[in-house]
Amino acid sequence: MFKDYPKEQIQAKLKQVDKFEAMWGVKPVSKSWRKWCTDYEYRKREWQWRQSIAEYASENAHKIL
């Protein structure tokens, strides 16, 4: 079950993005972080993707070794 991050944590990350972009300009990584900070559904899908990767790795770890 997805549980969103606290608003304070999201706002702190957004400030980091603003600072980064002020120094280095807009980069693909900063665009993705900005999207993560401003879009609930994006955060939720990203979390689901990470859960799927972890589940796949867990189920197939024995095949790798």
Image (tube, grey):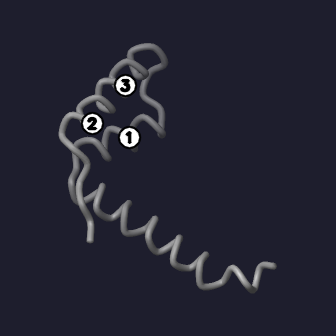
Check the image and report above or below for 62 versus 41. Answer: below
Q: Nearer the viewer, mark 1 or mark 2?
A: 2
Does label 1 or label 2 sit earlier along the sequence? 2
Q: Position of residue 50 (x, y in %)?
A: 46, 65
Q: Amino acid at mark 3?
A: Gln
Q: Amino acid at mark 1?
A: Trp
Q: Which residue is mark 2?
A: 9
Query: Residue at left 30%, top 45%?
Result: 35
Vertical placement of 20 versus 47: above or below?
above
- Residue type highlighted by circle 2: Gln
Q: Are marks 3 and 1 in contact (CB under 8 Å)?
A: yes
Horizontal side of residue 39 vs 48, given as left or right: left
Q: Quadrant location of the N terminus?
A: bottom left
Circle 3 — which element? helix
**Vertical arrangement, residue 53 with respect to residue 25, above or below:** below
- Measured Cα–Cα span from mark 3 to mark 1: 9 Å
Q: Quadrant of the C terminus?
A: bottom right
Instruction: Please name which of the two marks, 3 or 1, marks the residue nearer to the observer.
Output: 3
Q: Where does residue 61 sit, x and y in percent of width and height? A: 69, 79
Residue 60 x %, y %? 66, 84
For marks 1 and 2, give the CA distance.
Answer: 13 Å
Residue denoted by label 1: 33
Select label 2 or label 3 by which is in front. Answer: 2
* Relative side of 48 to 56, left or right: left
Mark number for residue 55? Answer: none
